[in-house]
Amino acid sequence: MTDFLLELRCEEIPARMQLKASEDLARLFTEELAKAGLKPASIDSFVTPRRLALIARGLLLETAAVSEEFKGPRTSAPAQALEGFLRKTGLTQDQLEDRDGVWFAVVNKPGRATADVLAQAVPAVVRAFPWPKSMRWGAASQTTESLRWVRPLKGIVAILGEDLVDIEIEGLHSGYATLGHRFHHAGEITIGGAHDYAEKLRACHVIVSHQERQAIIAARADEAATAHGYSVIEDKGLIAENAGLTEWPVPLLGDFDPAFLEVPPEVIQLTLRINQKYFVLRDAAGKLAPAFICTANIEAKDGGAAIIAGNRKVLAARLSDARFFWEQDRKTKLADHAQKLERITFHEKLGTVADKVERVAKLARWLVEEGIVKGADADLAEQAARLAKADLVTEMVGEFPELQGVMGGYYARAEGLPDAVADAIRDHYKPVGQGDDVPTAPVTVAVSLADKLDTLRSFFGIDEKPTGSRDPFALRRAALGVIQIITANDLRFAVAEGDLLDFFADRLKVQQKEAGVRHDLIDAVLALGGEDDLVRLLARVKALQSFVATDDGANLLAGYKRAANILKKEAPDLSATPAFARVTNKELSYEPEKAEADLIAALDAAEPRAAQAVAAEEFEGAMAALATLRAPIDAFFDAVTVNDADPAKRTTRLALLARVRDAVHNVADFSKITG
Amino acid sequence: MAEGKVLSFQDLILTLHAYWGKQGCVILQPLDMEVGAGTFHPATTLRALGPNAWNAAYVQPSRRPTDGRYGENPNRLQHYYQYQVIMKPSPANLQELYLGSLVEIGIDPLVHDIRFVEDDWESPTLGAWGLGWEVWCDGMEVTQFTYFQQMGGYDCKPVAGELTYGLERLAMYIQGVDSVYDLKFNDAGVTYGDVFLENERQMSKWNFEVADTEKLFRWFRDCRAEYDQCIENGVPLAAFEQAIKASHTFNLLQARGVISVQERASYMGQVRDMAKGSCEKWMEVNGWAA
């Protein structure tokens, strides 16, 4: 058993691709070895901006010998068939066995040296590597067939135990040598093997483990912040990104002019995080601190003073821009900004953003005036809707599109608009996906709902519906947002019709699945048809879910299914015509058995109760009414023969089962319920 | 930055010329036409096509009319300089050569934090794209580093490496000044502002307020017509010059704010067609297969 080290060194790999690449390397490598029957005991993966590496531990030095048997043509077959078989197996005729008139070949494959397997496997992995984007380079790129890699591939280290595995990929030969840190170590380093790889590189200022670099960044950033009385606002993505930009991470703390803190904190945070990849800090009071932490890639000769000074300067320039936008944007009222929305196309078939705003404003007012959104002032809702998109033409949102809404909220407050309006502008894009805050402030609810409903109706109106994975206008997210707003605020109205209602139903199933609501129960209620009030629909589904979880529910479901099966088998054409289904005790042409009479009586009692409860939207009551049928149905099946020799009895009893089915269907279509 | 002698703006250029000249680059003079970026110089756009080796370096004045600020913004100019290096095929040590140039202009990589941060480049106008980085020095982008993969819609065979230094920004960093106008242009007391401030004021005014839009629209149409004639007569270098002129004229119309959103796409499409058409003809007259 021995260990194998592979390092693929290249020019800087984009930070965002490194961890996935590291996993892909381990996976592809394992797959290639498996083809030759080799399986390492374990694989350690490493990745830095300039290298992808792995150590496969516990490899056998040779693969196991295998013996394979092939059946050939009959011995009486024409010579050509035999020749073909010999070519295929690589044997001669005297090596074949004649077994009852059929040629058999036994091919013994000796074990292969693991080094040979590796020499083939590595180039295969490199050629098949799934980089999200790859490129050609250098003299070899004279042809488009030349090797592709994420950035130019520069070196290969491949050592099995202590022996070099000879690998050649497009003129690049494997060796023992690699490079250390770009600036801290000049010249090549010779690697002995898996055992000294990580430590030799560490001595040359390269920490090969991504996880270790992340841990260093997190710990040293915390340390630096604490020393200044600050704390780091946690950001795992940013830690990983900085670990992907450094081989020797050195977090350094710098400050900026506290005067910049007059700019909204969201702006400062984005400037630091997105533009500069700096960590954002909080002071003891929890407020944004006038300081940042950058992650350098060197242990600077001057302790980092020049690096901090340079970064401060860059940041100051960026924050000056942000402050300029903040001041500039506030010189114009939101209503005047909104005028410019006439110049922005929303969709070629749906007009400008200004047109959309007009529709949303009307709809928001309507939602309030109709009493669908309660507790809001219709004028404020309309005003907020008219201003909600105005920040799209501000300089700040042009620079930071992710601040749409947020900036509008700040600008609205700055010009003295009511809080309800400013809040609605700020939050009207919410909820953005599952887990985001769902608006509950009435004006916000009206604007947010109107905006999303307008988007959905407009795009469905021009037949731009999501298909498969294509949803360019994020309509699924909009529908999900509508559902969340409706359910969180108990809004009662017909949300849509036709295709759009079906689309909502699908989204509802997906959304409710995560909330633990069974989609078959949603289907059972939807199958009744015509339900466009999502609140009522869910109340019914929830009552149903509780009910089927009870003994009564489970047994009623079993009884229902038995009745439905008999009907399907014995009377497939027996439609549930009311005249036929309404079997009553009085009309019977024969003396009913007790269980039969009891079931009829129970139905007589339960049907109006259930119907009333449904009409009053008391779905637990409706379920309770159904529950009273359980015992009579069970008793009926125990005591009464449906398929009676007397055709009158048989027909009547089938009709009775149809009545049971229909009574249940008044509450939900139980045939859609699984299990 | 205070290690050794601090380079003036003109010495920064001269140092880069000397350095890249030593690496075998032809030191060209700027293209004598208005362009938005050094990449538009035929020494980059057209020379990136075809199989021939080509190494060149030059300064390119770049004009972006909408970036004008009447000389009032310390960082934004409607006319500034790019330093452009193109090496084809891309040498194996291009990164090292580039880092050598930083050392040459006084940036010590053991004092300053130099990083290669993913930044892929795309120019729909030129039908071009490449992979590479923006190079950061202490958190500031100082250079765009690109391996061209396609130009004019054609695969680059072989691939060229392109470096674009933002000269003013780099100089401001090296000299430690906060306003571009305070840059030392030379060591004899002349500042960048002495040379260019009035130019920024007047040209901003012309770009935004004065330029006769009737004439600009006509120039654009004329460029288009002249381009067609050039293509018909098999002179793609001349055709490409018309594409460059059309592109700048379009930028001026943008600055004048007379192009609607709908028209914008159409004008950009025309410029793209001219640029790509010139590349296509260039390939053809050289007998290069796609």
Image (spheres, rainbow, N blue to C red):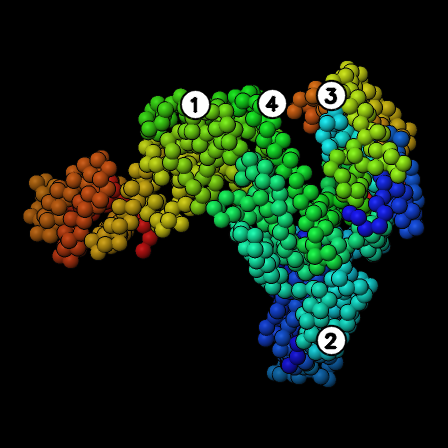
Task: Classify 10 Å Cα crowding around label 1: few (below 14), some (14-19), many (20 and above).
Answer: many
- Tell me: residue B179, above or below residue B217: below
A85, A418: nearer the viewer:
A418
Q: Residue at label 1?
A: A382
Residue A215 found in image quarter: bottom right
Numbered disc in front, either 3 or 1: 3
Question: Sequence order check: which comes first, mark 2 or mark 1?
Answer: 2
Q: Is residue A543 left or right of residue A411?
A: left
Taking A256 as reference, is A422 above or below it? above
Q: Earlier in the sequence, mark 4 or mark 2?
A: 2
**Looking at the image, is mark 3 or mark 4 nearer the viewer?**
3
* Residue shown at the point (64%, 46%) measured from the top left: A276
- Write down the chain letter for disc 2: A
Q: Have a look at marks 1 and 4 and say if they share a chain.
A: yes
Q: Sequence order check: which comes first, mark 1 or mark 4?
A: 4
Q: Amino acid at mark 2?
A: Gly
The disc label shown at residue A641, or none: none
Query: What amino acid type should be assigned to the residue bearing mark 3?
Result: Phe
Is residue A153 visible from the viewing direction of this image? no
Asked which secondary structure carries label 1, the reply is helix
Residue that numbered label 3 is attached to: B208
Question: Residue A384, percent across and down?
Answer: 45, 26
Residue drawn at x 74%, y 80% as measured from the top left: A92
Separation (CA) of disc 1 from disc 4: 21 Å
Residue for badge 4: A343
Marks 3 and 2 share the same chain: no
